[in-house]
Image: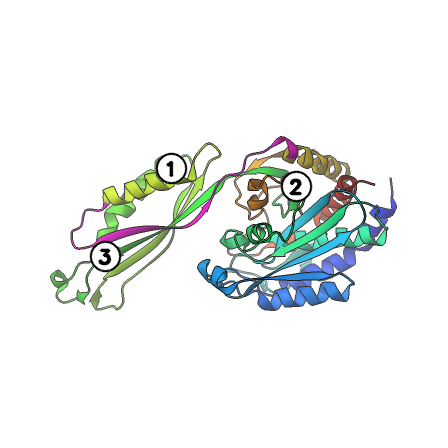
Amino acid sequence: MVTPLNSALLAAQPVAQELLAALVRLPTENPPGNVAEATAWLASYLEGRGHMVERHPVPAPFARHHNRADLENLVVRRVFGEGPTIALHAPLDTLPAGAGWNREPFGGEIREGRLYGRGARDSKADLAAYVAVLEALTATGHGSGTLELHITADEESGGFLGPAFLLSQGLTTPDMVIAAGTAYQVIVGQEGVLHLEVVLRGRQAHASRPRDGSDAILASLPILQALSVEADKSAMALTITTIGAGRGRNLVADRMRFTIDRRIAADESGDAVEAALQALIEGSHTVDGVSVECRRTLLAEPVTPTAPSMRLAHTLSRHAEAVFQQAIPVGSAPVVSGARHYALAGIPTALYGVGPPVIGEGVDMSGDEWVSLEDLERATLALGAAVGELLGG
């Protein structure tokens, strides 16, 4: 059945596509996390379309603590009337573009119904869809509830400067949250993640006299081997993600640094996982004259579904099934989203946005990321209908 809201959502699609292309053309890779230009542009864009934009800068010391420069969160708040407050959360930052692209990663090229570019799918398409939903509900004169857009920029570094900051500062108190998704399915459960930095410190010497020094690289080998064995037998992914050492080609390395990404299952404790890994690292260290230090850089506890989050998810799923004409499952997924901060604060939270059918499809870590414009339209229709119902009226 065609409704005024459906018509408004369809009418908003050209604007949503143009916004998505414009966002993709603004690099927001994290790291390094230089998002100020894109954030300023988006704030001006939204104000130019008649929206009141709240700018919430993160204090510099707090941002620096999380290895970020100046950072600003945007909140758009539209009060329609009495009723619940729903927040739509989408991050601006993306993974680094990497190599291997067949198209310009920041070109926003459209070809055969797909829009290409870093962030097209993860998660700038969701942001474009959320803006379209806000504008369609505004255009149809929706009469109840409050709809907020939360636009942050630290998805790839934990969400502490985005959702966690907004909540801790009392800048928003939503009754429920719909956040950037990863597939047709609606996600209510997320795995956790632990990031550790391991530093070995030895003593520098000239490469012609290696016994005068203590080689941090060689000292790391038993530790890396022990971690490799642990990764092979662990049910959850354990990955060495970065590595660096040495100060010169003719010097014994006095410092070796590497980082670990360990995923955390719903029935695991992050603190217990960290303690076990530190014990493994310290127990594998056998070289005199070299010290080893482990430092936590991120701990994101897993999110388990709750009855309220499942009700929210099933509302989204029901409307998505009506649009897509296929089953839209509700469940957990191996993702770590900054939106977990809403869920861990007790706010019903579900991840849903713009396709594709399978988690990870169209999100190439090094090559051509893309999103289907048909999926953008259909997900926007599903979101708009669900949000309209959830707001009441």
Determine the CA span between mark 2 and mark 3. Answer: 47 Å
Residue 113 showing in the rendered view: no
Residue 151 vs residue 344: left or right?
A: right
Q: Is residue 44 above or below residue 215?
A: below
Q: Nearer the viewer, mark 1 or mark 3?
A: 1
Q: Which amino acid is tagged 3?
A: Ala
Residue ID for mark 3:
216
Helix, strand or loop under label 3 = helix
Residue 298 is inside the magenta segment = yes
Residue ID for mark 1:
272
- 176 or 155, which is in the foreground? 176
Q: Which amino acid is tagged 1?
A: Ala
- 154 or 325, which is in the foreground? 154
Give the image location of residue 109, x and y in percent.
Answer: 66, 62
**The residue stretch that appears in magenta:** 285-308
Residue 73 vs residue 270: left or right?
A: right
Say which label, 1 or 2, has the lower sequence index. 2
